[in-house]
Image (spheres, rainbow, N blue to C red):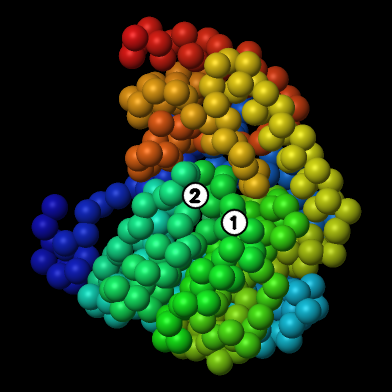
Amino acid sequence: MNDPRLTPLAAALPATAPFVGPEAQERAQNQAFIARLGANESAFGPSSKAVLAMGAATPDIWKYGDPENHDLRVALAEHHGVGPEHIAVDAGIDTLMGVIVRLFVGAGEAVVTSDGTYPTLDYHVTGHGGVIHKVPYQNDKTNPAALVAKAIETGAKLIYLANPDNPMGSWHEATALTRAFADLPEHAILLLDEAYGEFAPDRTLPPVDTADRRILRLRTFSKAYGMAGARVGYAIGAAETLVHFDKVRNHFGMNRVAQVGALAALKDRAWLDHVVNSTARARERLSWIAGSNGLMPLASATNFVTVDCGAGPDFAAAVKDALIARGIFIRMPFAPPGNRCIRIGAGTPADLDHLARALPLALQDARAIIG
Ligand SMILES: *Cc1c(COP(=O)(O)O)cnc(C)c1O
Protein backbone atom coordinates (compact mmCIF):
# COMPACT_ATOMS: atom_id res chain seq x y z
CA MET A 1 0.00 0.00 0.00
CA ASN A 2 1.52 3.30 -1.08
CA ASP A 3 1.35 6.09 1.49
CA PRO A 4 3.02 9.32 0.36
CA ARG A 5 3.73 10.27 3.97
CA LEU A 6 6.22 7.42 4.37
CA THR A 7 9.91 8.11 3.92
CA PRO A 8 11.20 6.68 0.63
CA LEU A 9 13.02 4.02 2.63
CA ALA A 10 9.94 2.98 4.61
CA ALA A 11 7.83 2.98 1.44
CA ALA A 12 10.29 0.53 -0.11
CA LEU A 13 10.31 -1.88 2.84
CA PRO A 14 8.16 -5.00 2.68
CA ALA A 15 5.67 -5.47 5.54
CA THR A 16 6.96 -8.49 7.41
CA ALA A 17 6.11 -10.38 10.57
CA PRO A 18 9.37 -12.20 11.28
CA PHE A 19 7.92 -14.19 14.13
CA VAL A 20 4.22 -14.97 14.37
CA GLY A 21 3.67 -15.11 18.11
CA PRO A 22 2.19 -18.19 19.77
CA GLU A 23 -0.67 -16.02 21.00
CA ALA A 24 -1.67 -15.21 17.42
CA GLN A 25 -1.58 -18.92 16.58
CA GLU A 26 -3.70 -19.72 19.64
CA ARG A 27 -6.24 -17.14 18.53
CA ALA A 28 -6.25 -18.56 15.01
CA GLN A 29 -6.65 -22.15 16.28
CA ASN A 30 -9.07 -21.02 18.98
CA GLN A 31 -7.17 -23.27 21.35
CA ALA A 32 -4.30 -22.81 23.80
CA PHE A 33 -1.03 -24.68 23.26
CA ILE A 34 -0.36 -27.52 25.70
CA ALA A 35 3.42 -27.04 25.37
CA ARG A 36 5.12 -23.75 24.51
CA LEU A 37 8.43 -24.80 22.99
CA GLY A 38 8.83 -22.47 20.02
CA ALA A 39 10.28 -19.18 21.25
CA ASN A 40 13.36 -20.36 23.17
CA GLU A 41 11.88 -19.04 26.38
CA SER A 42 12.81 -20.80 29.62
CA ALA A 43 9.92 -23.06 30.55
CA PHE A 44 11.54 -23.36 33.98
CA GLY A 45 10.64 -19.74 34.65
CA PRO A 46 12.43 -17.03 36.60
CA SER A 47 14.00 -17.16 40.05
CA SER A 48 11.34 -17.02 42.75
CA LYS A 49 13.49 -14.29 44.34
CA ALA A 50 13.10 -12.24 41.16
CA VAL A 51 9.35 -12.82 41.24
CA LEU A 52 9.16 -11.65 44.86
CA ALA A 53 11.33 -8.60 44.17
CA MET A 54 9.19 -7.65 41.19
CA GLY A 55 6.02 -8.04 43.25
CA ALA A 56 7.46 -5.84 45.97
CA ALA A 57 8.48 -3.22 43.39
CA THR A 58 5.08 -3.04 41.72
CA PRO A 59 3.57 -0.32 43.98
CA ASP A 60 6.42 1.96 42.83
CA ILE A 61 5.43 1.51 39.22
CA TRP A 62 4.19 5.13 39.19
CA LYS A 63 7.87 6.13 39.09
CA TYR A 64 9.97 5.97 35.93
CA GLY A 65 12.87 3.56 36.10
CA ASP A 66 16.35 4.93 36.72
CA PRO A 67 17.38 6.07 33.23
CA GLU A 68 21.01 5.21 34.03
CA ASN A 69 20.12 1.67 35.14
CA HIS A 70 22.70 2.32 37.82
CA ASP A 71 22.15 -0.51 40.28
CA LEU A 72 21.78 -3.17 37.60
CA ARG A 73 24.82 -1.92 35.70
CA VAL A 74 26.95 -1.93 38.83
CA ALA A 75 25.85 -5.48 39.65
CA LEU A 76 26.46 -6.68 36.08
CA ALA A 77 29.85 -5.00 36.04
CA GLU A 78 30.81 -6.82 39.20
CA HIS A 79 29.45 -10.08 37.77
CA HIS A 80 31.72 -9.74 34.71
CA GLY A 81 34.70 -8.23 36.51
CA VAL A 82 34.61 -4.92 34.62
CA GLY A 83 33.74 -1.32 35.47
CA PRO A 84 30.10 -0.13 35.09
CA GLU A 85 31.19 2.12 32.20
CA HIS A 86 31.65 -1.12 30.25
CA ILE A 87 27.97 -2.12 30.59
CA ALA A 88 24.97 -0.71 28.70
CA VAL A 89 21.50 -1.92 29.68
CA ASP A 90 18.43 -1.74 27.47
CA ALA A 91 15.15 -3.54 26.81
CA GLY A 92 16.63 -6.78 25.50
CA ILE A 93 19.27 -7.60 22.92
CA ASP A 94 16.81 -6.77 20.16
CA THR A 95 16.59 -3.18 21.40
CA LEU A 96 20.36 -2.90 21.81
CA MET A 97 20.79 -4.04 18.21
CA GLY A 98 18.59 -1.15 17.10
CA VAL A 99 20.70 1.34 19.07
CA ILE A 100 23.92 -0.08 17.63
CA VAL A 101 22.65 -0.07 14.04
CA ARG A 102 21.43 3.49 14.40
CA LEU A 103 24.86 4.59 15.63
CA PHE A 104 27.07 2.66 13.24
CA VAL A 105 25.17 1.83 10.04
CA GLY A 106 24.48 4.61 7.56
CA ALA A 107 22.44 4.36 4.35
CA GLY A 108 24.09 1.97 1.93
CA GLU A 109 26.64 0.73 4.46
CA ALA A 110 27.44 -2.96 4.68
CA VAL A 111 26.73 -5.36 7.54
CA VAL A 112 27.82 -9.00 7.52
CA THR A 113 25.90 -11.87 9.07
CA SER A 114 25.26 -15.58 8.55
CA ASP A 115 22.53 -16.81 6.22
CA GLY A 116 19.83 -18.37 8.38
CA THR A 117 21.01 -17.06 11.75
CA TYR A 118 18.93 -15.00 14.22
CA PRO A 119 17.41 -12.35 11.96
CA THR A 120 16.58 -9.35 14.15
CA LEU A 121 19.71 -7.41 13.26
CA ASP A 122 18.75 -7.67 9.57
CA TYR A 123 15.45 -5.89 10.24
CA HIS A 124 17.20 -3.03 12.00
CA VAL A 125 19.82 -2.75 9.26
CA THR A 126 17.30 -2.83 6.45
CA GLY A 127 15.12 -0.34 8.32
CA HIS A 128 18.01 2.10 8.46
CA GLY A 129 18.96 1.67 4.82
CA GLY A 130 22.01 -0.52 5.43
CA VAL A 131 22.88 -3.48 3.25
CA ILE A 132 23.08 -7.03 4.62
CA HIS A 133 25.68 -9.44 3.24
CA LYS A 134 25.21 -13.08 4.19
CA VAL A 135 27.75 -15.84 4.58
CA PRO A 136 26.54 -19.45 4.48
CA TYR A 137 26.77 -21.80 7.42
CA GLN A 138 29.40 -24.50 7.26
CA ASN A 139 28.22 -27.85 8.64
CA ASP A 140 25.30 -26.14 10.41
CA LYS A 141 27.68 -23.74 12.16
CA THR A 142 28.47 -20.08 11.63
CA ASN A 143 31.75 -19.59 9.77
CA PRO A 144 33.80 -16.94 11.63
CA ALA A 145 36.69 -16.83 9.16
CA ALA A 146 34.28 -16.37 6.23
CA LEU A 147 32.46 -13.61 8.13
CA VAL A 148 35.71 -11.75 8.63
CA ALA A 149 36.71 -12.25 4.99
CA LYS A 150 33.32 -10.92 3.87
CA ALA A 151 33.68 -7.92 6.18
CA ILE A 152 37.05 -7.11 4.64
CA GLU A 153 35.67 -7.58 1.12
CA THR A 154 32.61 -5.35 1.70
CA GLY A 155 34.16 -2.83 4.10
CA ALA A 156 31.45 -3.68 6.63
CA LYS A 157 31.71 -1.99 9.98
CA LEU A 158 29.32 -4.36 11.69
CA ILE A 159 29.65 -8.14 11.83
CA TYR A 160 27.13 -10.31 13.61
CA LEU A 161 27.77 -13.70 15.14
CA ALA A 162 25.69 -15.58 17.68
CA ASN A 163 27.69 -18.02 19.78
CA PRO A 164 25.98 -20.36 20.57
CA ASP A 165 23.88 -19.92 17.45
CA ASN A 166 20.13 -19.70 17.06
CA PRO A 167 18.45 -21.50 15.24
CA MET A 168 21.04 -24.28 14.82
CA GLY A 169 22.14 -24.59 18.48
CA SER A 170 25.75 -25.01 17.32
CA TRP A 171 28.73 -23.26 18.90
CA HIS A 172 32.43 -22.54 18.55
CA GLU A 173 35.13 -22.80 21.15
CA ALA A 174 36.41 -19.43 22.30
CA THR A 175 39.90 -20.06 20.97
CA ALA A 176 38.58 -20.69 17.44
CA LEU A 177 36.64 -17.41 17.56
CA THR A 178 39.54 -15.43 18.93
CA ARG A 179 41.78 -16.79 16.18
CA ALA A 180 39.29 -15.91 13.43
CA PHE A 181 38.62 -12.45 14.79
CA ALA A 182 42.28 -11.53 15.16
CA ASP A 183 42.02 -10.42 11.51
CA LEU A 184 39.01 -8.19 12.12
CA PRO A 185 39.75 -4.69 10.82
CA GLU A 186 40.31 -1.93 13.40
CA HIS A 187 37.28 0.03 12.17
CA ALA A 188 34.90 -2.94 12.50
CA ILE A 189 32.61 -4.00 15.34
CA LEU A 190 31.85 -7.63 16.00
CA LEU A 191 28.45 -8.03 17.61
CA LEU A 192 28.96 -11.20 19.57
CA ASP A 193 25.48 -12.31 20.56
CA GLU A 194 25.72 -14.51 23.64
CA ALA A 195 22.00 -14.83 24.33
CA TYR A 196 22.61 -18.52 25.18
CA GLY A 197 26.00 -17.96 26.82
CA GLU A 198 24.88 -19.28 30.20
CA PHE A 199 24.01 -22.67 28.67
CA ALA A 200 27.24 -23.12 26.75
CA PRO A 201 29.97 -25.55 27.80
CA ASP A 202 33.15 -24.23 29.42
CA ARG A 203 35.58 -22.63 26.96
CA THR A 204 32.79 -21.41 24.66
CA LEU A 205 32.76 -17.76 25.72
CA PRO A 206 35.95 -15.79 25.06
CA PRO A 207 37.23 -13.91 28.12
CA VAL A 208 35.78 -10.42 28.38
CA ASP A 209 38.28 -7.90 27.02
CA THR A 210 36.88 -4.40 27.23
CA ALA A 211 40.12 -2.96 25.85
CA ASP A 212 39.28 -4.46 22.43
CA ARG A 213 37.14 -1.76 20.82
CA ARG A 214 36.18 -4.13 18.03
CA ILE A 215 33.97 -6.40 20.11
CA LEU A 216 30.56 -5.75 21.65
CA ARG A 217 29.03 -8.68 23.52
CA LEU A 218 25.29 -8.94 23.89
CA ARG A 219 23.66 -10.76 26.81
CA THR A 220 20.09 -11.13 27.99
CA PHE A 221 17.82 -12.08 30.86
CA SER A 222 15.37 -13.60 28.36
CA LYS A 223 16.81 -17.09 28.12
CA ALA A 224 18.59 -18.77 31.07
CA TYR A 225 17.21 -16.22 33.55
CA GLY A 226 13.70 -16.95 32.32
CA MET A 227 12.60 -13.32 31.99
CA ALA A 228 11.81 -12.84 28.30
CA GLY A 229 8.69 -10.83 29.04
CA ALA A 230 10.57 -8.42 31.31
CA ARG A 231 12.77 -7.24 28.42
CA VAL A 232 16.25 -6.81 29.91
CA GLY A 233 19.48 -7.15 27.98
CA TYR A 234 22.91 -5.62 28.11
CA ALA A 235 26.02 -4.96 26.10
CA ILE A 236 29.58 -5.38 27.37
CA GLY A 237 32.29 -3.44 25.61
CA ALA A 238 34.70 -0.54 25.48
CA ALA A 239 33.48 2.49 27.43
CA GLU A 240 34.28 4.81 24.52
CA THR A 241 31.92 2.79 22.30
CA LEU A 242 29.10 2.44 24.81
CA VAL A 243 29.13 6.14 25.69
CA HIS A 244 27.56 6.88 22.29
CA PHE A 245 24.48 4.81 23.14
CA ASP A 246 23.17 7.79 25.13
CA LYS A 247 22.87 9.73 21.86
CA VAL A 248 20.06 7.63 20.48
CA ARG A 249 18.72 5.22 23.09
CA ASN A 250 15.30 5.55 24.71
CA HIS A 251 16.44 6.81 28.11
CA PHE A 252 13.22 5.86 29.86
CA GLY A 253 12.73 2.65 27.93
CA MET A 254 13.48 0.30 30.81
CA ASN A 255 10.61 -0.97 32.89
CA ARG A 256 11.26 -0.18 36.54
CA VAL A 257 9.96 -3.56 37.75
CA ALA A 258 12.14 -5.36 35.21
CA GLN A 259 15.24 -3.50 36.46
CA VAL A 260 14.52 -4.77 39.98
CA GLY A 261 13.73 -8.28 38.76
CA ALA A 262 16.93 -8.59 36.74
CA LEU A 263 19.00 -7.46 39.72
CA ALA A 264 17.41 -10.12 41.95
CA ALA A 265 17.76 -12.77 39.24
CA LEU A 266 21.45 -12.02 38.81
CA LYS A 267 22.02 -12.59 42.51
CA ASP A 268 20.24 -15.95 42.53
CA ARG A 269 23.08 -18.09 41.23
CA ALA A 270 21.45 -21.27 42.57
CA TRP A 271 18.39 -20.82 40.37
CA LEU A 272 20.51 -20.17 37.30
CA ASP A 273 22.47 -23.37 37.98
CA HIS A 274 19.22 -25.27 38.45
CA VAL A 275 17.87 -23.99 35.12
CA VAL A 276 21.08 -24.75 33.26
CA ASN A 277 21.16 -28.30 34.67
CA SER A 278 17.45 -28.91 34.05
CA THR A 279 17.85 -27.61 30.51
CA ALA A 280 20.77 -29.96 29.86
CA ARG A 281 18.67 -32.91 31.04
CA ALA A 282 15.75 -31.73 28.90
CA ARG A 283 18.04 -31.48 25.84
CA GLU A 284 19.10 -35.08 26.38
CA ARG A 285 15.57 -36.36 26.70
CA LEU A 286 14.41 -34.25 23.76
CA SER A 287 17.23 -35.65 21.64
CA TRP A 288 16.26 -39.14 22.69
CA ILE A 289 12.59 -38.54 21.81
CA ALA A 290 13.61 -37.23 18.38
CA GLY A 291 16.04 -40.10 17.76
CA SER A 292 13.59 -42.80 18.81
CA ASN A 293 11.17 -41.38 16.22
CA GLY A 294 13.77 -41.73 13.46
CA LEU A 295 14.81 -38.05 13.43
CA MET A 296 18.32 -36.67 13.91
CA PRO A 297 18.85 -34.22 16.78
CA LEU A 298 21.76 -31.81 16.30
CA ALA A 299 24.16 -31.10 19.16
CA SER A 300 23.07 -27.99 21.05
CA ALA A 301 24.63 -25.57 23.53
CA THR A 302 21.35 -23.71 24.03
CA ASN A 303 17.91 -24.23 25.56
CA PHE A 304 16.53 -25.84 22.40
CA VAL A 305 17.36 -28.75 20.12
CA THR A 306 17.27 -28.43 16.37
CA VAL A 307 16.13 -31.67 14.81
CA ASP A 308 16.89 -32.78 11.27
CA CYS A 309 13.70 -34.35 9.91
CA GLY A 310 15.67 -36.21 7.26
CA ALA A 311 13.88 -34.80 4.21
CA GLY A 312 13.39 -31.41 2.59
CA PRO A 313 11.94 -28.19 3.95
CA ASP A 314 8.38 -29.17 2.95
CA PHE A 315 8.50 -32.21 5.19
CA ALA A 316 10.01 -30.26 8.10
CA ALA A 317 7.29 -27.62 7.70
CA ALA A 318 4.62 -30.34 7.64
CA VAL A 319 5.99 -31.83 10.87
CA LYS A 320 6.08 -28.39 12.46
CA ASP A 321 2.51 -27.65 11.38
CA ALA A 322 1.30 -31.03 12.59
CA LEU A 323 2.87 -30.48 16.02
CA ILE A 324 1.29 -27.04 16.18
CA ALA A 325 -2.09 -28.51 15.25
CA ARG A 326 -1.60 -31.01 18.08
CA GLY A 327 -1.00 -28.23 20.59
CA ILE A 328 2.81 -28.17 20.61
CA PHE A 329 4.22 -24.75 19.72
CA ILE A 330 7.54 -25.05 17.88
CA ARG A 331 9.31 -23.21 15.06
CA MET A 332 11.78 -24.08 12.31
CA PRO A 333 14.83 -22.41 10.75
CA PHE A 334 13.93 -20.11 7.83
CA ALA A 335 16.84 -20.65 5.46
CA PRO A 336 18.37 -23.64 3.69
CA PRO A 337 20.02 -25.90 4.65
CA GLY A 338 18.66 -25.38 8.18
CA ASN A 339 15.07 -25.54 6.98
CA ARG A 340 15.25 -29.33 6.76
CA CYS A 341 15.00 -29.07 10.58
CA ILE A 342 12.52 -28.16 13.26
CA ARG A 343 13.53 -26.34 16.44
CA ILE A 344 12.11 -27.51 19.77
CA GLY A 345 12.57 -25.90 23.18
CA ALA A 346 14.12 -27.89 26.04
CA GLY A 347 10.99 -27.63 28.16
CA THR A 348 9.86 -29.06 31.45
CA PRO A 349 9.33 -32.82 31.92
CA ALA A 350 5.58 -32.25 31.44
CA ASP A 351 6.22 -30.37 28.17
CA LEU A 352 8.37 -33.21 26.91
CA ASP A 353 5.73 -35.78 27.91
CA HIS A 354 3.34 -33.92 25.61
CA LEU A 355 5.97 -33.86 22.87
CA ALA A 356 6.68 -37.58 23.25
CA ARG A 357 2.98 -38.35 22.76
CA ALA A 358 2.43 -35.90 19.89
CA LEU A 359 5.57 -36.44 17.79
CA PRO A 360 4.82 -39.94 16.40
CA LEU A 361 1.32 -38.79 15.45
CA ALA A 362 2.62 -35.56 13.92
CA LEU A 363 5.08 -37.58 11.83
CA GLN A 364 2.21 -39.75 10.58
CA ASP A 365 0.26 -36.59 9.72
CA ALA A 366 3.26 -35.13 7.86
CA ARG A 367 3.94 -38.35 5.93
CA ALA A 368 0.31 -38.52 4.90
CA ILE A 369 0.65 -35.05 3.36
CA ILE A 370 4.17 -35.21 1.92
CA GLY A 371 4.33 -38.95 1.23
C1 LIG B 1 16.27 -14.84 21.85
C2 LIG B 1 17.43 -14.19 21.19
C3 LIG B 1 17.65 -12.82 21.31
C4 LIG B 1 16.61 -11.92 21.93
O1 LIG B 1 17.04 -11.39 23.10
P1 LIG B 1 16.16 -10.32 23.88
O2 LIG B 1 17.08 -9.89 24.96
O3 LIG B 1 14.92 -11.03 24.37
O4 LIG B 1 15.82 -9.22 22.93
C5 LIG B 1 18.80 -12.29 20.78
N1 LIG B 1 19.68 -13.07 20.13
C6 LIG B 1 19.49 -14.38 19.97
C7 LIG B 1 20.51 -15.19 19.25
C8 LIG B 1 18.35 -14.98 20.48
O5 LIG B 1 18.11 -16.27 20.26
Residue 317 is tagged as none
At horizontal 36% and vertical 61% (from top left) the residue drawn is 122
Which quadrant of the figure contains the C terminus? top left
Q: Are discs 2 and 1 less than 8 Å apart at CB?
A: yes
What kind of element bears circle 2?
loop
Q: Nearer the viewer, residue 137 or 331?
A: 137
Q: Quadrant of ligand 1?
A: bottom right
Q: Which residue is mark 1?
A: 172
At horizontal 69% and vertical 39% (from top left) the residue drawn is 43
Horizontal side of 188 relative to 255 (left or right) equals left
Q: Nearer the viewer, residue 351 or 116?
A: 116
Query: Does the image show residue 12?
Result: yes
**Sequence-first tag of 2 and 1:** 2
Dividing the picture into quarters, in which one does residue 242 lie? bottom right
- Name the residue type under label 1: His
Horizontal side of 110 relative to 54 (left or right) equals left
Q: CA distance from mark 2 to mark 1?
A: 8 Å
- Name the residue type under label 2: Lys
Q: Which residue is mark 2?
A: 141
Q: Position of residue 250 (x, y in %)?
A: 50, 77
At horizontal 79% and vertical 60% (from top left) the residue drawn is 265
Dividing the picture into quarters, in which one does residue 58 lie? bottom right
Q: Position of residue 366 (x, y in %)?
A: 41, 14
At horizontal 30% and vertical 49% (from top left) the residue drawn is 16
Q: Position of residue 48 (x, y in %)?
A: 84, 50
